[in-house]
Image (cartoon, rainbow, N blue to C red):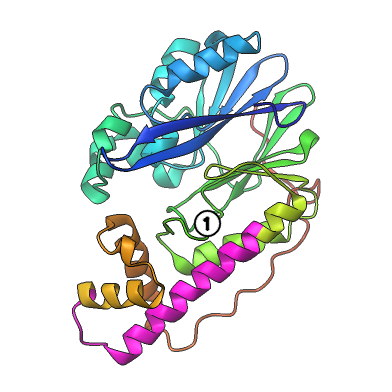
Amino acid sequence: MKINEQVHQLKITFQLTPQIKRYVYVYIITGRHCYLIDTGVHGSETLIQSYLESIGKSLADVKGIFLTHSHPDHIGAAQAIKEASGAPVYACRGEREWMEDIHTQYKERPIPGFYDLLKRSIKIDHYIKENDLIPLESGLTLEVMETSGHSKESLSFYLREAQTLFTGDAIPVRGDIPIFVSHSKSLETLLKLMNLKQVSQFCPAWDHAYDREQGLQAMKDGYEYLEAIRQAAASVMKESPDAPEKDRFLMVCSRLSLDSLALNPLFFQSVHAAFEEAVISQPPQLPLPPSASCTDKGSPHTLL
């Protein structure tokens, strides 16, 4: 689906388990050539190729693959598309090991159906970081932002000319599984995104594209959702500090009316992270970041 003059959104559905169906959005930036924001799960290259053909393009037109983070539903087709197109892969250095050695990722994060979603490791060609500027072609420029919390070093990408921000999984969806490795970093990221003045469209991987008003509301809802988890974890830690972590986890699920997630290993990891930060009696006050992000101010690093 075309969502603005430069960007298309493609929904990739997949089975996490035989009982659980999920989806993720891949974004395609179009100009003279094409550029991918994430690649979906293993096998998604077929769907991406079909969509490209429907708009008069092909995998051969892909000249860059940009990965927001290392989770299987975002990088599953990256190596196949790289080989088919010759396009370089851009990603963060902090999640290199999980991308370039998927067996390490599985050992440290053994989610259900891992090897059905991600079968091949990905060789990163360019390491990118906060404030890097990437001139894709004339009239198309990406700015890199660090938006960690959901994963160790998640990235978002700002397409300057379209005032469009690709946020990966940085914005949690209320009622869905909240996944984060750092609760405080997730909150900092949401505050950072809410203070960007130049963005007119937010493009998450878990939901439809938001206009500015919808995006700000989604981030506010996400912030309140994560804060509710923090408060529940802190309360349980205070009341039952010596209880086994599994029991404390179940208490948090009950208090949040999320009993359906009581057997979910990803939510357990999120609550574990909240427990680790809840030992601080007074949570840190998160300052609002400068509103100059995603502008021409400063001295960004330019990658050719």
Residue name at image x 45 percent, y 11 percent: 84
User: 63 or 304: nearer the eye?
Assistant: 63
Above or below, 240 against 47 in this view is below
To which residue does mark 1 refer? 172
Q: Residue at x 33, y 85 (%)?
A: 237
Farthest residue, direction left? 244
Crowd tier of the residue under label 1, counting other residues whose Cα lies within 10 Å: few below 14, some 14–19, many 20 or above: many
Instruction: Point out residue 36 in the picture as x, y percentages from the top left corner.
Output: 57, 26
Q: Secondary structure at mark 1?
A: loop
Q: How many marks are shown on the rendered structure?
A: 1
Quarter holding the C terminus is top right
Where residue 229 appears, as percent x and y from the top left, is 44, 72
The N terminus sits in image quarter: top right
User: Depth check: 65 or 296 in front?
Assistant: 65
Q: Is residue 278 visible?
A: no
Q: Is residue 112 left or right of residue 54?
A: left
x and y percentages locating residue 169 in the rendered image: 51, 48
Where does the image place residue 251, in percent across and percent down from the top left?
A: 30, 78
- Residue bounds of the magenta highlight: 218-245
Residue 154 included in the magenta stretch of the image: no
